[in-house]
């Protein structure tokens, strides 16, 4: 194995059960009633025997399957050890090693070890860039352009594998020549929804789009327009809408005075919210009440950051509320409501699951968002028209989840509960998105195997289809 990430200890094949044979360990586990462990050690004994004897039928896949079994049972220490064993059994096929590294990345993510997780992902994507997923009898083949980090739109709910063959393509590790060797596909969805991705990945994505001969949804130039500093001038002026001003700092300010002047020129008053680029879920976001506290964080920022005026959006009962909506082809759908006593509102930190009265209010919002928001119909229509006119896209905010035994990253706490609370609305979201995909699939079939004329291509590649927004209510 070449260059494992630091901290990824590789277990020697003979160290699985020191002093024990596979049969003795299997028998001991069976005696203790652990049938899974008994089966696991039997598989390991057979695979290791074949590996040591260089048997032509040797495969590391059975050991990787055992590791994935422990992983799916959330027995991560055992899964970690078994994945390490897989990587020690040279030469593990690239696909097997990639699967092991991706699940190791998930384990490190859940253990709050982001650097190790990223290093494992990089090891995986050096070995494999294309991942094909399907179940049932798919009717279309979707190419999903992704990045290697956590900047991707979570599509499991919207694009299941029952009707879609999903071809995931990790662009930032793929050479341009690999674009020409991809499996056949009907249309493309740009799953890189974070507008703050690296310039190199931006250029790679745009280059792929220029060469792509299929309809493409969620175009990268439109995603770029969702950077935080662009939103206030586009939505302010809509009745009932308040968008605090925001500026983007491309680098740490040289001096405190330079920072003061930039804030003053932007018309932003304290308190403010500071957050680094590509930071989501409140990670590293800080409220600063004066210039000194802002300088303490902005002056140390290695890369770029955002500074936004803080707006107190507490309701009359003292709670902060965040309503999240998903727009699909210009139509709004409710996603969730989080109610918190803290200004940084997240579903998983607001104790939504433990308070029935909050859950009941959220359910009323999911079932009848217009009544819950209490906006006049004309305001809602103008807001929707403005959003659609400015073509906001879907910015991916959560990490991907496990697929066919491979887990890229973990869901943040509470997302499964949130999905359960809004199960019926989520079905509507999925249905709407499927209708959108069907329309683009039909456009693709108009030009089987050929590059349509530019005018027709533009008609088959709408600039605006999917985005999500969070509404902070101060009613």
Image (cartoon, grey):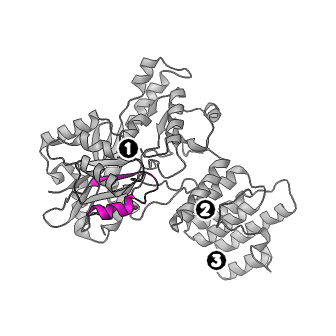
Counting residues from the start of the chain, the first of labels 1 and 3 encountered is: 3
199 lies above or below 446: below
* Residue 189 coordinates in the image, percent (x, y): 47, 38
Q: Which residue is nearer to you in this view: 243 or 319?
A: 243
Residue under circle 2? 104
Magenta segment boundaries in residue numbering: 281-308
The residue shown at (60%, 33%) is: 179
Q: How crowded is mark 1: few (under 14 residues within 10 Å), some or many (20 or more)?
A: many
179 lies above or below 229: above
* Residue 172 coordinates in the image, percent (x, y): 57, 43
Q: Is mark 3 on a helix, strand or loop?
A: loop
Counting residues from the start of the chain, the first of labels 2 and 3 encountered is: 3
242 lies above or below 461: below
Residue under circle 1? 394
Disc 2/disc 3 C-alpha distance (Å): 24 Å
The C terminus lies in quadrant: bottom left
Q: Which of the two marks, 1 or 3, is nearer to us in this view?
A: 1
Can I make out residue 170 in this image? no
* Residue 310 coordinates in the image, percent (x, y): 24, 57
Residue 346, numbered circle: none
Disc 1/disc 3 C-alpha distance (Å): 46 Å
Disc 2/disc 1 C-alpha distance (Å): 28 Å
Q: Does the magenta portion include 296?
A: yes
Residue under circle 3? 34
């Amino acid at each position: 194995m070449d260059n494992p990430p630091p901290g990824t200890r590789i277990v020697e094949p003979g160290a699985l059960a020191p002093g024990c044979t596979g049969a003795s360990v299997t028998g001991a586990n069976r005696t203790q009633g652990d049938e899974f462990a008994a089966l696991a050690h039997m598989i390991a004994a057979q695979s290791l025997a074949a590996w040591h004897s260089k048997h032509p039928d040797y495969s590391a896949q059975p050991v990787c399957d055992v590791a994935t079994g422990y992983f799916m049972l959330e027995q991560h220490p055992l899964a970690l050890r078994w994945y390490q064993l897989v990587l020690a059994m040279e030469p593990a096929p690239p696909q097997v090693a990639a699967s092991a590294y991706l699940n190791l990345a998930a384990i490190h993510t859940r253990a709050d070890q982001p650097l190790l997780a990223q290093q494992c992902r990089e090891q995986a994507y050096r070995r494999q860039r294309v991942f094909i997923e399907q179940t049932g009898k798919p009717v279309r083949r979707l190419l999903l352009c992704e990045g290697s980090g956590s900047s991707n739109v979570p599509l499991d709910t919207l694009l299941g594998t029952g009707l879609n063959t999903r071809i995931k393509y990790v662009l930032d590790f793929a050479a341009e020549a690999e674009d020409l060797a991809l499996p056949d596909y009907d249309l493309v969805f740009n799953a890189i929804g974070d507008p703050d991705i690296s310039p190199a990945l931006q250029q790679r994505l745009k280059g792929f789009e220029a060469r792509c001969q299929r309809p493409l949804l969620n175009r990268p130039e439109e995603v770029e327009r969702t950077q935080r500093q662009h939103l206030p001038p586009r939505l302010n002026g809509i009745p009932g809408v308040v968008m605090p001003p925001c500026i983007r700092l491309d680098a740490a300010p040289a001096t405190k005075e330079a920072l003061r002047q930039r804030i003053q020129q932007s018309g932003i008053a304290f308190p403010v919210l500071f957050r680094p680029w590509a930071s989501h879920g409140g990670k590293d976001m800080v409220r600063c009440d004066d210039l000194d506290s802002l300088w303490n964080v902005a002056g140390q920022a290695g890369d770029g950051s955002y500074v936004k005026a803080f707006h107190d959006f507490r309701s009359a009962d003292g709670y902060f509320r965040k309503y999240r909506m998903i727009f699909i082809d210009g139509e709004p759908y409710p996603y969730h409501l989080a109610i918190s006593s803290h200004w940084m509102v997240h579903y998983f930190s607001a104790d939504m699951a433990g308070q029935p009265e909050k859950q009941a209010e959220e359910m009323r919002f999911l079932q009848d968002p217009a009544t819950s928001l209490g906006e006049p119909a004309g305001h809602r229509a103008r807001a929707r028209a403005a959003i659609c006119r400015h073509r906001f896209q879907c910015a991916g905010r959560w990490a991907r989840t496990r697929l066919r035994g491979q887990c890229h990253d973990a869901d943040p706490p509470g997302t499964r509960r949130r999905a359960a609370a809004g199960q019926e609305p989520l079905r509507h979201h999925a249905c709407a998105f499927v209708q959108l995909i069907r329309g683009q699939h039909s456009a693709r079939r108009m030009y089987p195997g050929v590059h349509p004329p530019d005018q027709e291509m533009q008609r088959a590649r709408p600039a605006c289809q999917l985005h999500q927004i969070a509404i902070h209510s101060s009613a």
